[in-house]
Image (spheres, grey):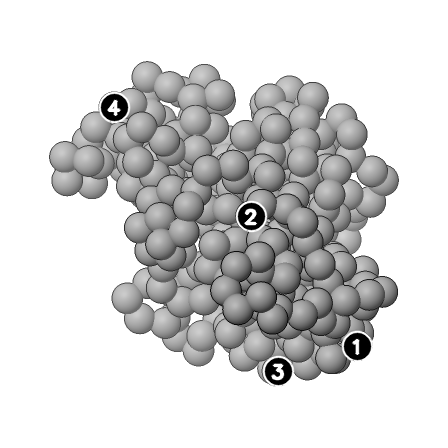
Amino acid sequence: MGDLKLGLSVGYWGAQPPPGFGVELAQEAERLGYDSVWSAEAYGSDAFTPLAWIGARTSRIKLGTGIVQLSARTPAAVAMTAVTLDHLTGGRLILGLGVSGPQVVEGWYGMPFPKPLARTREYVSIIRKALARAEPVTNDGPHYPLPYPGGTGLGKPLKLIVHPLRADLPIYIAAEGQRNVALATEIADGWLPIFYSPYRDEIYADALRGRAPGFDIACPVPVVVADSVEEALILPKMYLSFYIGGMGAPTMNFHFDVISRFGFEDEAQHVRKLFLEGRREEAARAVPDALADETSLCGPPERIKERLQAWIDSPVTTLIAGTQDARALKVLADALG
């Protein structure tokens, strides 16, 4: 394969888990030489458990959380889980973190959403301190103070009992805003965008300017193999309409903001209106073909191979294929082989 690494996204579960819990697809990705497999979470299945299941049935492929939501767990709890899973899988974990949005953070986790950048910085700092085991972990920040300043007053700074397999376990940050992306280049080992266009690299050029050599940009990309482009675009258009219309509040939707920066604000407004009115099929149809096409790889195998060149030429260093089709995995592997 070339310099562009390949990953597989198994996402998060719908109403029921996928057949085989994604294991066979992950095994096929490993067989084809894929570098990583990624799970996710929203407010259903969690991100860590499927990776443990897949990790027990694979031997080489890296296991990434794409993403663990900050407000679901304290930093110390994430450090414990990460260290445990990294040991169990022989040092294959990539810890992807993200703030999610106010609807989930405040509505599902019952936690405050404000100051996401400051919370992220503090969260990562605590995890890195825990992994280093240089001293008992303390934190003076306002978001995750350690020891807790109230309560009994008996809180004690502690160290992880288990020595991490890797003190430098890689941490990636999911981010959409310019300042969030710049923060990822400062404190993390990689960036996880949710939507990216290799035809609009200039959008994030300034935010990525400070990234260090080896900084990984691991980008999820829907991949659909079909006889016609029109047929193939149905799935990414459904996916885009859901995030534009449903994964965020009308007054604060970071996914909507990204699509607007791509130059599709008017179209996104229309998609959101249809989605919020319950007209979901119309909302999906209203997603511009151009937007769906440039943020995915769709159509016959030869077209996918041709359009893959734009991703190879972009700053993206890991293309995470969003697919449940083993054929799509092979198309990408063959193109980069």
- Left or right of 263? Residue 266 is left
- Left or right of 158? Residue 78 is left
Disc on the earlier residue, 3 or 4: 3
* Mark 3 vs 4: CB contact within 8 A: no
Disc on the earlier residue, 2 or 1: 2
Mark on residue 270?
A: 4
| Mark in the foreground, 4 or 2 | 2
How packed is label 4: few (under 14 Cα within 10 Å), some, or many (20 or more)? some
- Residue 212's quadrant in the figure? top right
Q: Which residue carries the number 3 mark?
A: 56
Q: Amino acid at mark 1?
A: His
How packed is label 2: few (under 14 Cα within 10 Å), some, or many (20 or more)? some
Q: CA distance from mark 1 to mark 3?
A: 21 Å
The one of 276 and 235 positioned closer to us in this rendering:
276
Q: CA distance from mark 3 to mark 2?
A: 35 Å
| Mark in the foreground, 3 or 2 | 2
The one of 163 and 317 positioned closer to us in this rendering:
163
Q: Amino acid at mark 4?
A: His
How packed is label 3: few (under 14 Cα within 10 Å), some, or many (20 or more)? few
Q: Which residue carries the number 1 mark?
A: 163
User: What is the x, y in percent for residue 164?
Assistant: 77, 73
Disc on the earlier residue, 4 or 2: 2
How packed is label 1: few (under 14 Cα within 10 Å), some, or many (20 or more)? some
Q: CA distance from mark 4 to mark 2?
A: 37 Å
Disc on the earlier residue, 3 or 2: 3
Disc on the earlier residue, 1 or 3: 3
**Residue in the picture at 63% in, 26% down:** 204
Q: Which residue carries the number 2 mark?
A: 143
Q: Amino acid at mark 3?
A: Ala
